[in-house]
Image (tube, rainbow, N blue to C red):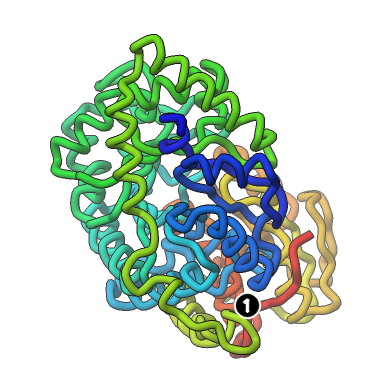
Amino acid sequence: MGTALGVLLSGVSGAAVPQWLASRIRDGLAGVILFAENTPDPAATRALTDELRSHRADLVIAVDEEGGDVTRLQARTGSSFPTPAALGAVDDPELTRRCAELLGRLVAEAGIDLDLAPMLDVASEPENPVIGVRSFGADPDLVSRHGRAYAEGLAAAGVASCGKHYPGHGDTRSDSHAGDAVVDVPAEVLARRDEAPFAAAGVDSVMTAHVVVPALGPEPASISAWSTERLRAAGFTGAIITDALGMRAISDRMPLGEACVRALEAGADLLCLDAPQHREPEQALLEAEAAIEAAVASGRLSAEALRESAARNRRLHRREGGFDKLSQPEGGFDKLSQHKLSQRLGLEVARRAIVTRGAPRLSGDPVVIDLRRRYNLAAGDTGAVLVGALRERWPGLSLHDDPAYADPNRSLLVIWPGAEAADVAALQQLRERHPDPVVLHTGVAAAAPEGVRLVCSHGSAPPNVLAAIEVLADQPALTSTPTEERP
């Protein structure tokens, strides 16, 4: 058995296990991470995880299931759970724990061990293009208490948790998926604001971010020893996982194999390679394995240190009370996970979180101008659920993305993300032609525009959308979440 495999988290294409992956699992691959393309429906997801585990019982299977805008297991319909921003706005940790336990049951019933959640980033920069409503909020204490509640909820469902993205990605104006991301603050500010939730949340593992903190070093945290040294000095003993090493904040600097070696030199335990939609998974695994084995042979990496990391990684498998303890009744695990309960709970949270200003009620079928970029590198497509729900309520609406479109005889609804300067400019241009629109703001409340009739939904997930529609229509929302599938 090669020493490299025990520290690698591989992707896979599709919903079946190819021979190359089966072979690596039998030889000691640490884990497999699932994305939306691997989870088309509950039955197919469980069939895949059962097949993966048939090749080795203690394989760690992971998923990036945050709920809200970022979902893999409910990617076609949108998550039945509210965004972390909505949970933070309500600020009821017990409600957060209940939501996380229900989400954890969905994860566990799918045969998955590790959820790459909760988000522990402190959303201190309203114009952040990638964190936003994925964070519980801008206050470290709030993020800490909800992060802990979330980890407790996952644990109650038998699922291991992963706090991300250490040391914090919330104070950037760029996205590490797309290039460099920098948190340019003194070390004491980083410790007090950004690192504090990681010390308080009680998570099973921590994901390091590809963010540069100039006060601590010139390179991203995920490949810098200071990140793991600070985590261990704070008493964290669990597995340290890298964010995907194929993201451009790393890949623009070095090849994947070298990034793997650098991350292990820095003290990481488990290397997330790349998403299957970005790089062929077998190629990525072969490149990583070859580079690590070469580094061990040359003395650059210690085989003993890799074995210690592999042991930490194995502890993320099958928490007590996890999926192996759950029966699967006729009709599949969607029934067992109390899906209707999660819908009701999600809508309850979203209703309590809604922020309004002015009189944002729409009269008649509106003209809708959607100023969002409908694909997010972290969340994927975020457009279809919201537009589908609006069409279900107002079948005669007209959808446009041209701010110059005008129809003086109809209500105007502007969907606005409000995360970047370009969003502000687009709304300003639109208001020069339409001075009194209703704005449905899907971002964080701190970035909401001034001087307009406003509904702030804290996200585009179905519960958030339905709560916003209640306000816009001035009547109760639908009794269930939208079911329009994303293309």
For the residue pair 415 and 45, the one nearer the viewer reads as 45
- Above or below, 274 relative to 485: above
Number of numbered discs: 1
For the residue pair 442 and 61, the one nearer the viewer reads as 61
- What residue is drawn where x is 52% and y is 64%? 68
Residue 337 in view, yes or no: yes
- Above or below, 473 relative to 63: below
> Residue 402, how many percent across, how many down?
80, 50
- Above or below, 122 relative to 355: above
Is 396 left or right of 412, judged from the image as shown? right
Residue 441 in view, yes or no: no
User: Badge 1 is on which residue?
Assistant: 469
Density class for disc 1 (Cα within 10 Å; few <14, some 14-19, many ≥20) is: many
> Residue 69, how many percent across, how many down?
56, 60
Instruction: State the SS at label 1.
Output: helix
- What residue is drawn where x is 83% and y is 54%? 405
Is 293 left or right of 417, judged from the image as shown? left
> Residue 434, how many percent across, how many down?
72, 57
For the residue pair 403 and 170, the one nearer the viewer reads as 170
Outermost residue toward the top in this view: 298
